[in-house]
Amino acid sequence: MCAVRALCVPVLVAGTAGACTNADEPEVRHVAESFAGADPAGRCQLLAASTRTALEQDDSSPCPAAVAGLPLGSGEVRSVEVWGQDALVHLSDDSIFLTRGPNGWQVSAAACRPDGERPYVCQLEGS
C-alpha cells in the first residue's frame, strides 16, 4: 500500500511553507475526535471508501474485525493542518490523514508514524 506515501509528500511539502487557518479545521477536528473515540464499527463508518476496501481486502475480514486488530490512537487532538482536500491531524498517540470527499471529511490513513525524512508509514491506508 503506497497511496498514503504519495499523499504525505504534498502534505509535508505544503507544511514547510506554513499552514494557515482554514474554515474546514473545526469539521476535520470533529471527525478526528470522533474516530479516536469510536468503537471499531464507528471507526469503519468514518473511513474513506478506498481505505475501508483496502483494509477488508488485506485482512480478509469485515472492517470492524480488521480495525480492532490495528494499533489506532484514541488520544486527544494536538494539532490540525488542512490543505485543500487533505488534512493531517496529530493525536497525542497517533497521526491520521483525512480527505474531503462527496460525504464530507473521512479518514484516509491512521496508525501513522513519521519515517525520518521520508513520508509517514501508516498501518491503515487506502490503495
Image (spheres, rainbow, N blue to C red):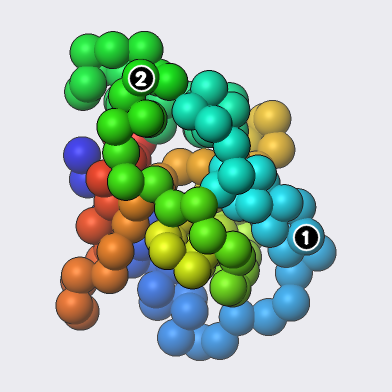
Q: Residue at x 52, y 42 (%)?
A: 107
Q: Residue at x 56, y 86 (%)?
A: 18
Looking at the image, is 5 positioned above or below residue 55? below
93 left or right of 105 in image: left
Q: Earlier in the sequence, mark 2 or mark 1?
A: 1
Q: Nearer the viewer, residue 120 or 16?
A: 120
Residue 121 visible in the shown view:
yes
45 left or right of 49 in image: right
Q: At label 2, which amino acid type do we have? A: Ala
Quarter of the figure with the N terminus: top left
Q: Quadrant of residue 101?
A: top right
Q: Residue at x 30, y 38 (%)?
A: 70
Q: Residue at x 81, y 64 (%)?
A: 23
Location of residue 41 in the rendering, given as x and y in whole percent from the top left corner = 53, 22
Q: Secondary structure at mark 1?
A: helix
Q: Residue furthest bottom?
A: 17
Residue 6 visible in the shown view:
no
Residue that carries the numbered disc 1 in the rendered image: 26
Looking at the image, is 127 positioned above or below residue 22? above
Q: Secondary structure at mark 2?
A: helix
Residue that carries the numbered disc 2 in the rendered image: 65
Q: CA distance from mark 2 to mark 1?
A: 30 Å
Location of residue 114 in the rendering, given as x and y in whole percent from the top left corner = 27, 70
Q: Nearer the viewer, mark 2 or mark 1?
A: 2
Location of residue 19 in the rendering, given as x and y in whole percent from the top left corner = 60, 80
